[in-house]
Amino acid sequence: MGRTSALVTVFGLLLALTASLPNKDDWDIYSFHINSTVTSRYATTVITSRVANRMNESKEIEFHVQIPKNAFISRFRMMMDGQVFDGVVKTKEQAQEQYTRAVSRGQSAGIVRSVGRTMEEFKTSVTVAAHKKVTFELTYEELLKRTHGKYELQIHARPMKPVEDFKADVHIHEKAGVSFVDVKGGLSTKALANAITKTHVDKQAWVHFYPTVNQQKNCDSCGEEGMNGDLVIVYDVNRDNGFGDIKTSDGYFIHHFAPSSLPRIPKNVVFVIDQSGSMHGRKITQTRTALLHILNDLAEDDFFGLISFDGKIIHWKRELVQATDLNLEGARGFVRNIEDRGSTNINAAVLEGARILNAHPREGSASILILLTDGDPTSGETNLETIQSNVKRAIAGKFPLYCLGFGFDVNFEFLEKMSLQNNGVARRIYEDSDADLQLKGFYDEVATPLLTDITMIYVGGTNLTKTNFSQYYNGSEIVVAGEIIDNNVEIFTPQVVAISSKQKVTFSNPNGSVDSSVSDGLLQRVWAYLTVKQLLEKELLLSGPEKAKVNKEALELSLTYGFVTPLTSMVVTKPEGESTEIHHKPKEKEERPLPQRHQRRQHVMVQPRTHASLRPQRRTSSTPLVLSYKSLNFDSGHIHLPTIAPVSHRFLMKTVNDTYPLCFDIIGAVIVKLLHHPSTELYINGVLDSRKNGGFKEIVIHVGADFHIKVEPERIRLQQGQTITHHTRTENITAGRFTVNRGKKQTEVTDGDMHLVILVHQKHGKKFLWPVLRRLPSAGDTEGLLALNRVHYEEVHRDVHTKVKIANRETDTQRSTAVDLRIRRPVEVGCWLIPTDFVLPKSLTDFLVARV
């Protein structure tokens, strides 16, 4: 079996203060941690950066981070002076409403800008009081894509100064087995060799990068401002059978299909090359260089064609020819003579390429059409929709079209849509010294077809991601995820049918084996991530009601799983007086990077901060920070909110006069802030079920970023640093400062003088949780639903109507009932049902968080 590996892009980091700081000794990044966990090709990366203000006055501190373009931010948090500021993912409309209010107060907007081929830069800032600290924590998730037969995890480290506690930890866990791990990149040098440790044991691998302060100053990519370079972790996965590996968990599955022991399929490839005047200079030179290398790699049983175009078509040959030595030598001469001139007739050129392929059908071969252009059509047919329609009709689903956009003058969205309409992809080629290698690298991805007409079949599966693929290439990977009907693994039967060379082949699951050891909802998140990505691609091809329907599906999933996607925004409340920012994900056509000498920092004037302004404030008077992955341009289209049947959960309010209690509803399968005790860094959150009155499906207790206790109806998951243990039996557990007593019907958690009981209830055969706080922490800085004080209310009777009065405020009410889940044997009680925001001391949004 050929060696395989897969590619993971993690991210580079940048953390700095404002350029206006007079002295870098005034601030200190005293801890800078990167923690990336890769499980079943799904990477979750957490950046935790802790910064101290050493000055005798308040100072604005910025947080910069680079994230992969394909990743979704799923959590952002700032912790400062006992306050926690969590991000909440909302629809664009909701975020826009908050932003508009902030702009009316004279505040400004920020952006996420492209910083290269694979990264985007996010930044925010917060004012830190004298001699105080701030902690930034950002999490993003990404499904790893396999290219060139390998996974690569790239870390770009540029902290802007040496950091005493700098750690990068990578943990890879692949049930198929990790065959090797290697570390490369600009930071993998002799000077930093002893800062890197690498461990590989069967199915797991660890890489740790702990450079000292001196090493951060003296390596090849280092200096007085610390490191500035890449660390690249490369690994390979064992593949023992052609079917690949399939994993199931909690009613979901994921299938990685990447057979390698297959005969290559001879290909028919036509290159359509733009030689218009805009290709002048280095672009046309690099294109010629790349084509000469590609011609050298064609096999003798391949057939190929070459077309160059400007305002007219220039043929080398009008038909496909075999890649014999004689023909290849003639093609090289044609390539060397390609010169830039004239206008750009994309329509005629692509249609001619399709004609050549259609005129030469070969049984047992795979056809590919590759277009390279650097601009919009300027001659012949110039209407973009008409060109797309013409090309789709000419190709008629027979072969894929790959569009390579050279530079930033090209309309990339036009190329992307045309590629997706014809089972291909679009790729930007960046104007750089290695553009010829980029072209050759893309060709290598599609150079070796192994299968065509691939159909992935899953009997007993539903809600599947894409299951039909036109071609599969050596070194790539097909990934399908979905749900298993009724979680019945016994009837779940996966199968793959495809064409290999000249015959139909079927791949089946050997011995019906599936791996069901994956846990903690990971596969469900993989399914959601992949589904959202594919829905966004599908939306690009649709219009009218169909487009709106797909948009709605993608939006619902983005909100449900807390993903910041092109359809959602993340709102973060910051201290009063801070500026509001909208961070949007730039489209490809917006990503033209400024030359370094032209990049200037823009300052936003804000009111002077005092120590008083940094004291904890009620969030009703705070300013939201909006983190968005798409520009809030509502002139270009309106995103309608989905119509979803409300899922409600009824809560009983603790009252002084309990003769007839108050009750209120929380709508949605949301994550609730149960108890936060900032002075001890204790945070307890609960995830409400998606069933009406279904209680909590999990409750998570954590201290800082490295200690977590997840309580579920059937087990407890304990994580201390990199160590994870699961407990399913009745037992007493001592973990750090916590004592956990797990029983069949309840779990008790003690932390100092805090005592929490988590009851296990059952409804319609399904278990759920309900927390009861027996004793609050003695310190008074607690917040959350469980920390609410008892409410004193009065009943006000007016005619036949009854109102509830609390502290001189009145609201309408109605008689209702609620199940009291705070006791071991729940009973139904009568209650006054009142609006949620009326009975809570703050808005309900202040009791919700984005992730547990």
Image: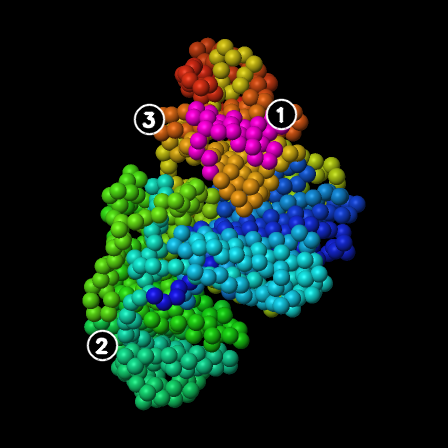
Q: Nearer the viewer, residue 213 or 87?
A: 213
Q: Residues within 10 Å of mark 1 (few under 14, many from 20)?
A: few
On the question of residue 472 being in view, the answer is yes
- Measured Cα–Cα span from mark 3 to mark 1: 36 Å
Q: Can you identify the residue that label 3 sits on?
A: 764
- Measured Cα–Cα span from mark 2 to mark 1: 81 Å
Give residue 420's position: percent from left, percent from top: 35, 62
Q: Looking at the image, is mark 2 or mark 1 nearer the viewer?
A: 1
Say which label, 2 or 1, has the lower sequence index. 2
Give residue 114's position: percent from left, percent from top: 54, 61
Tell me where the magenta segment starts and ends, as one range: 726-754
Q: Residue at x 54, y 26 (%)?
A: 756
Which residue in the rendered view is the most extreme toward the right? 56
Give residue 531's position: percent from left, percent from top: 37, 50
Dot 3 amino acid type: His
- Measured Cα–Cα span from mark 2 to mark 3: 63 Å
Q: In this picture, is 373 found above or below 797?
A: below
Q: In this picture, is 627 found above or below 836?
A: below
Q: Can you identify the residue that label 1 sits on?
A: 753
Q: Main secondary structure of the magenta part?
A: strand
Q: Which secondary structure lies at badge 2?
A: loop
